[in-house]
Image (tube, coloured by chain):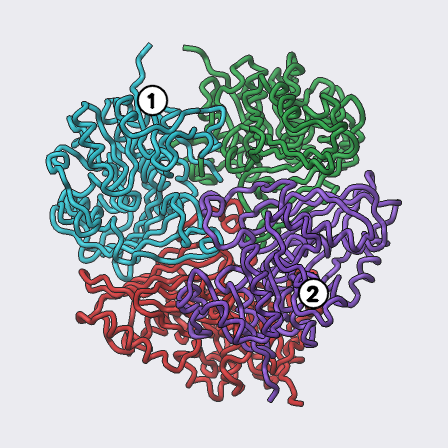
Chain colours: A cyan, B red, C purple, D green
Amino acid sequence: MEEKVNVGIIGATGYAGVELLRLLLSHSKVKVAAISSKSYEGENIQDIYPNFREIFSSLLCDNDTVIDSSDIVFSSLPSGFSEPIASQCVDKGKKLIDLGADFRLKDEKDYKNWYNLEYNDKELHDDSVYSIPELHKDLLTGKSIIGNPGCYPTSICLGIAPILKNKLFDGDIIIDSKSGVTGAGRGLSITTHFPECNSNFSAYKIAQHRHTPEIEQTLSNIAGKKINVTFVPHLIPINRGILSTIYVKLKKCSGLLDVYKIYVDFYSDCKFVRVLPVGSSASIKNVKYSNYCDVSLHLDKINNRLIICSAIDNTVKGAAGQAIQNMNLMLGFDEDEGLNLIPPAF
Amino acid sequence: MEEKVNVGIIGATGYAGVELLRLLLSHSKVKVAAISSKSYEGENIQDIYPNFREIFSSLLCDNDTVIDSSDIVFSSLPSGFSEPIASQCVDKGKKLIDLGADFRLKDEKDYKNWYNLEYNDKELHDDSVYSIPELHKDLLTGKSIIGNPGCYPTSICLGIAPILKNKLFDGDIIIDSKSGVTGAGRGLSITTHFPECNSNFSAYKIAQHRHTPEIEQTLSNIAGKKINVTFVPHLIPINRGILSTIYVKLKKCSGLLDVYKIYVDFYSDCKFVRVLPVGSSASIKNVKYSNYCDVSLHLDKINNRLIICSAIDNTVKGAAGQAIQNMNLMLGFDEDEGLNLIPPAF
Amino acid sequence: MEEKVNVGIIGATGYAGVELLRLLLSHSKVKVAAISSKSYEGENIQDIYPNFREIFSSLLCDNDTVIDSSDIVFSSLPSGFSEPIASQCVDKGKKLIDLGADFRLKDEKDYKNWYNLEYNDKELHDDSVYSIPELHKDLLTGKSIIGNPGCYPTSICLGIAPILKNKLFDGDIIIDSKSGVTGAGRGLSITTHFPECNSNFSAYKIAQHRHTPEIEQTLSNIAGKKINVTFVPHLIPINRGILSTIYVKLKKCSGLLDVYKIYVDFYSDCKFVRVLPVGSSASIKNVKYSNYCDVSLHLDKINNRLIICSAIDNTVKGAAGQAIQNMNLMLGFDEDEGLNLIPPAF
Amino acid sequence: MEEKVNVGIIGATGYAGVELLRLLLSHSKVKVAAISSKSYEGENIQDIYPNFREIFSSLLCDNDTVIDSSDIVFSSLPSGFSEPIASQCVDKGKKLIDLGADFRLKDEKDYKNWYNLEYNDKELHDDSVYSIPELHKDLLTGKSIIGNPGCYPTSICLGIAPILKNKLFDGDIIIDSKSGVTGAGRGLSITTHFPECNSNFSAYKIAQHRHTPEIEQTLSNIAGKKINVTFVPHLIPINRGILSTIYVKLKKCSGLLDVYKIYVDFYSDCKFVRVLPVGSSASIKNVKYSNYCDVSLHLDKINNRLIICSAIDNTVKGAAGQAIQNMNLMLGFDEDEGLNLIPPAF
């Protein structure tokens, strides 16, 4: 019998962490060796998340124990907390997949500007790789630290990459994203208190969201020149899912079908990106609880503006699922191992 | 004792009609004389809407009875059905406030293109006036037919009018709107079937929504030149409310405070538009069940793009409330008579 | 011009307090003189609740200022905090309507058992009166402290009072209540964190809820003998409303119509209780944002069990609205002054 | 390589049918050979349910084709439509698992009374078996027609079986159930129109729901005597899940721990029933998207009444999942094959 790879989760009780746990428990090639939580250390995960009763029982331990017990460490922590974890992992020969923001931005200036934090060990960052697998899988070889992308950037970059790659655009890029409430995390706040959040809808961190430099970094790399975007996130009163509506002026009067073909071609090897037939519109319902990113294309002919809708489950393709996809590629597993999740109809 | 004005509602069982009924019943200067419904003729409104039990009892009659019983007729019907009503009203010396689309578009070509219908009696349309009161109240004098605006156009035009009026913008206008499900009406459809709609979010009629020509007509009038917009509506799984996020490139590098002052000045006489202090963001929660339109202003400095959030209750300021506001102005009542609705905190 | 009565709210930023504020602002005979909040003292209510922008502006002050500025003081505080307020009010000749639990239970033992607190000034309690107006309005005369009922007891006691009064029941009373999330207050908790609460449904404090002795006290008084109930509350993922489903074995085989007549008779003078025609079922939708209590009657013939559904808005009839109703009666105003709220259709 | 069993779904576009499809596609021992739909015959399932895009493509065919292509036929049709399907299956040597009501009631009188329909081929019914696997798995041997239980009866019978089996109860059984909206099916109705359903809560078919005879049949069999129940279902504005709150008077003063032990013992071999530790309360959140039934036990000591909360996902354990569980047992597969679904945390 093939031996399973030991994996561990640091920050297992946050929403990304617990979704990771759920998905890893159904992954045929790994074994969840240890999980940690600062807030709930010493408690059983079942007492925090009773959905795991009679399925998975484990005490939440400290981070060191996770690192020592695992070949692959997933870290899902607030900004600034994963860098020291990474350092330990490298020292001990473990691989790290960081679901936080510490290994996403190449330019430390961006990290300082947007997160008000510094890189303490620059070498670590040089040795890390940022990976939306569909766009960066070739860069994974030989790396031991992966910066797993943010949820908004995943939906946005997958939605717009083919346009930038093929230099079809002209002028500004405007991104109007909408996210379910798990995107705000499990920490309590008045904004996410049920009666304040339910039946409401509003924008937040308008043109000031921390995912902006990450989006621009990825898009600039693809375009081969500096790209600025206007990015406005909104909160939808649902649990899961992101829909990004992206507005791009086309350079020339391409027909919608031509654009569609470029997308289909661009994603021909990418199981998890579904380019919807012209006439369909991406919706959160069709991707939730799955690792898919649905992309639909629409044309405002009068203004020659392409409108792209991109939908993901923020906690799967936008976090835990993509982290597993990165692990699969890193370890040479099938890319979709453990990720063959059919989105439920409702 | 002052005599009350008799008002009637044609199409009283649709969502706009029934909200109109609720608001008119609390209006001190009018009396609801008759209400009609094609689908429920002969039934008591209480049997369709049991919220009215022991409050208001009335059989739903036919349209002729409503017209004959009323001084002011409100009509809330599908496209094409209000024009003949208007004709009757004019013949009988009654005034009509149409909540449908028949008297919104000045150019018949737009009506043909977007609604696939014709104007049968052009004189009627010449005698009618389209009115978002804050923008058009001076035009109401002497008119006997009012085209009450659509919900999306109300939120959008109020959000962007000061910019256009003051010629501060440069280039394209992109409008990303989100509406609660009552905007889709009371007619059954799979899209608005609870399990399909709940926990979902998606765009629809992308760059193809019928409110587009109405938006462009109003904005062009204000700007004094032809304005094209890219307009994308989305469906939010909540009952009430619209939030429009509007993206406009500023002509020159105005500071946000300057723009704010222009808005405050523009709306200084307008009780129902609240320009939020810089730093606040308009949200549906703060306007629902009221006639307010909350407008907030945000700047993407790097791209010199102004982002405007505009929130209304689609069934009040976007339909029934605005219709009453128009009636008040037409009849010389206080503009806010019957509309002093404090939005509940939750 | 008639002078208005000065009213004040202690604890104005909780959900009951802020709903009280909204309703009192539309009450023609009172003026909101002062409002207080421990958590937000010194801030403007508009900054906590932006729905009040351009409608009502007031700094949140301390409790003493509220008492000194008001003829009638409403207090909406956690258990144990209203008794000292009451003492001050009595000393200064002010009347107090307490929306908390301090003046609901006549037997101090109940208060000790369920709230783990004591009555420090027994005389105060002797001088106070507990009032669901439909059941207790005769007791209000000459009292200066009113214990405003809890939300669950209101829906339950109104639902079952006619049965007890007429001694139609036999055996046990089982009450299965369901409440919207505002019932849990504005304090943050993981239970009311949006992603944990949304799409969920569960019971809580099963047969252990603090409203149990209040329910039993009221029912026992009506029945003229000690009544025990089994009471189980549940949390519905909506903002407002309570539906109580009450199960009572009938003493003899009464027809449903007979029971219906008894209810109609019992509530003949009660504007705010609507006994629904046989065949209808009470639902939260038809009472929300209003002071109505809808009661529907159903018979399980085989088991000769009466099933009563009773629906209220927990924040209006279950809290703020009923407090105003009590004030109106206390001051000799029309019982429905400020409470003519038509429940919206959606 | 082991050959897979061919399965087919009749009525694949209803909510139970489509959930069955999703689950069967992940079942390692079966192959979905054909699916049918009356309303959508000739269309691709992907066009009705775009969540299946790039995952499963199949035209919806007619029922005969499904029967001919399959070893096991699942039928999910309105009452009265499965009997003729069953007849065909038997003739052609196929096995049928009926998710409708045609093979649930042993006594034709019940079927007539509650469904207003007759059994046309009584032999078919004699050859069929009704199976909640935890209670009836021994009866499955040699049967070729399985009547898959209703959603409410599943949650209720699993919740109360140990009490009846052990004759611990005395007197009446009251069942207050609450279901998500998918329980009402995919057919459009004003009750399930989003704006009417959202933010609402109410009971329906009070003491008149068709699942009543099915519940009583199962409970009577377990108890060994005729059991009558009072059963009241309610609609929760969520998509999935049922919570049943069951009230039973205990014969003698058993301690809660004793009852708990009896439950644990009763379900010791049942993977899919989780008896929660005393002090926990079953909630929909912890079972949704899974085949689990969570049961929690609570005691109202004063009235010596046991309160049982039982939670399932109505579309999995209450329909599609249980049908697969029955198939697994019928075919000798592991009971949990294809059903190892970990309920997500949110």
Q: Residues within 10 Å of mark 1 (few under 14, many from 20)?
A: many
In the rendered image, which residue does mark 1 sit on? Answer: A33
Pick the front one: B124 or D10 = D10
For label 2, the SS is: loop
Q: What secondary structure is marked by label 1?
A: strand
Is residue D243 placed above or below B321 in the rendered structure? above
Quadrant showing the C terminus of chain C? bottom right
> Within 10 Å of the Cα at label 2, are there few (<14), some (14-19), or many (20+) other Cα atoms?
some
The CA distance from mark 1 to mark 2 is: 65 Å
- Horizontal and vertical percent position of residue A25: 39, 25
Question: In the figure, is residue D118 to the left or right of D28?
Answer: right
Chain containing mark 1: A
Chain to which the residue tagged by mark 2 belongs: C
Residue B95: quarter of image: bottom right
Residue receiving disc 2:
C127
Residue A262 visible (yes or no): no
Label 1 with label 2: CB-CB less than 8 Å: no
- Residue at x 63% of width, y 69% of height: C324
Report the residue at 24% width, 47% height from top.
A160
- Position of residue C288 measured from the top left corner of the image (x, y, whole percent): 60, 60
Query: Residue A173, relative to residue B268: is it above or below?
Result: above
Q: Where residue A307 is drawn, which disc sits there?
A: none
Residue at coordinates 40% horizontally, 31% vertically from top-left?
A341
Q: Quadrant of residue C334?
A: bottom right
Task: Tell me: residue D268, above or below residue B5.
Answer: above
